[in-house]
């Protein structure tokens, strides 16, 4: 398993839709935030009659014996509310504002995001068969205040970052598979089920807004499963003898795919809220993350280049990730830009192959 490759693909899922072109807080599509894989508190999901999800389920297949080992990691973004407060010189009080300018910089009220992870450590399948695993996780509320001082060192305002509490749980269990020919328990095929819940208390949910709920939500939530001494089975192109078992896997709000190099590694699965194919790749000509849903690097890069100086100043004021996009774009060479133009890829071919290998005994 190439851990660097896994992280790159998982990060692309994590930040998909985090912010959209034109990367400014004033843009309508950034004021009305949309992310994939949002798990709101249960009470809010019930108040919205299920239009917002509070749980996610991954089911996949692994071929291995009871000594094979499995670990599970969940990842998500924890949104942080950022408010800009301007100091009123007459009253000496701080007042919340949408934005303020100081020494040529723009500071804007917006949202930021903190990466979160929770992990069930490696466990033998034999032990998992006997005792399903449960992991509760919690990230506390936190407030940070950063003073904004002008070029003379005087306090002109402040940035207040507030992160709300999040609580959740991961359930992990294993179910022995069935032999497709005689219906008996097969020695090598197991079904793995991972369930992720947002259990954050959220009172008076029926009277709260979606933006309020998002502050208590798991955003861009996804699951990564790692196997040692066993191999996962593709749910998109399962071997013939496992086709029925693959079809019986029930995935809710997520799509498990194999991840690895050369299209032949089977020790890692990414269960993504975005539909992917097995062995997804980051385009080699891509200069870096652009976060925009269905991003097309060349078009977005050219559009950033045509922004006015005022628009670029506002983009920098969004957050550090937006600043990095702008800096990378402005420093791009003609050769790098040309690499994104006219890239031709061969169509992805699907070849039906029968897997004749035997799964390890249990």
Image: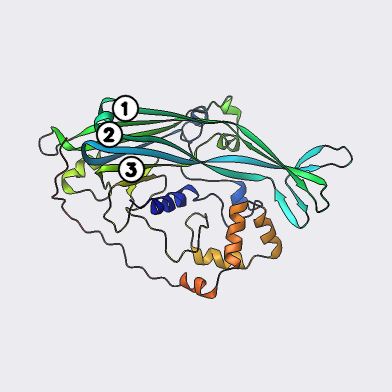
Q: Is residue 349 above or below residue 62?
A: below
Residue ID at (50%, 71%): 336
**Rendered location of residue 109, percent (x, y):** 69, 45
Q: Is residue 323 above or below residue 77?
A: below
Q: Residue furthest left?
A: 182
In the picture of the structure, the residue carrying the numbered disc 3 is 226
Q: Is residue 142 above or below residue 107?
A: above
- In this image, 187 relative to 116: left or right? left
Q: Earlier in the sequence, mark 1 or mark 3?
A: 1
**Rendered location of residue 345, percent (x, y):** 36, 68
Gap in angstroms between the C-alphas marked 1 and 3: 17 Å
Q: Earlier in the sequence, mark 2 or mark 1?
A: 2
Q: Residue furthest right?
A: 90
In the picture of the structure, the residue carrying the numbered disc 1 is 132
Residue ID at (41%, 59%): 282
Gap in angstroms between the C-alphas marked 2 and 1: 11 Å
Check the picture and name the quadrant holding the C terminus.
top left
Q: Tag on residue 249?
A: none
From this viewpoint, is residue 22 visible? Answer: no
In the picture of the structure, the residue carrying the numbered disc 2 is 124
- Report helix, strand or loop for mark 2: strand
Residue ID at (60%, 50%): 30
């Amino acid at each position: 398993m190439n851990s660097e490759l896994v992280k790159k693909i998982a990060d692309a899922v994590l930040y998909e839709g985090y912010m959209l072109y034109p990367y400014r807080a004033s843009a309508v599509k950034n004021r009305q935030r949309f992310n994939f894989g949002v798990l709101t508190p249960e009470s809010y999901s019930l108040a919205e009659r299920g239009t917002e999800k509070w749980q996610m389920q991954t089911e996949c297949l692994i071929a291995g014996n009871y000594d094979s080992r499995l670990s599970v990691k969940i990842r998500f973004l924890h949104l942080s509310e950022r408010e800009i407060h301007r100091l009123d010189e007459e009253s000496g009080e701080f007042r919340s504002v949408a934005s303020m300018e100081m020494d040529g910089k723009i500071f804007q009220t917006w949202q930021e995001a903190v990466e979160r992870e929770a992990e069930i450590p490696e466990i033998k399948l034999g032990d998992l068969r006997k005792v399903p695993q449960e992991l509760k996780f919690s990230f506390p509320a936190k407030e940070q205040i950063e003073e904004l001082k002008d070029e003379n060192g005087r306090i002109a305002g402040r940035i207040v970052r507030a992160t709300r509490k999040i609580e959740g749980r991961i359930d992990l269990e294993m179910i022995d598979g069935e032999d497709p020919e005689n219906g008996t328990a097969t020695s090598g095929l197991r079904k793995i089920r991972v369930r992720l819940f947002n259990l954050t208390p959220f009172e008076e949910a029926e009277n709260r807004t979606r933006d309020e709920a998002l502050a208590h939500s798991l955003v861009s939530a996804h699951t990564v499963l790692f196997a040692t001494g066993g191999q996962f089975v593709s749910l998109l192109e399962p071997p013939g003898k496992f086709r029925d078992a693959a079809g019986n896997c029930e995935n809710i709000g997520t799509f498990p795919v194999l991840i690895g190099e050369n299209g032949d590694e089977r020790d890692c699965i990414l269960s993504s809220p975005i539909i992917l194919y097995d062995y997804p790749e980051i385009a080699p000509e891509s200069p870096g993350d652009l976060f925009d849903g269905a991003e097309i690097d060349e078009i977005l890069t050219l559009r950033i280049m045509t922004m006015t100086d005022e628009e670029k100043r506002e983009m920098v004021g969004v957050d550090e990730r937006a600043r990095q996009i702008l800096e990378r774009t402005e420093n791009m060479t003609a050769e790098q830009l040309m690499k994104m133009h006219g890239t031709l890829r061969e169509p992805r071919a699907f070849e039906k192959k029968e897997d004749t290998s035997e799964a390890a005994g249990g």
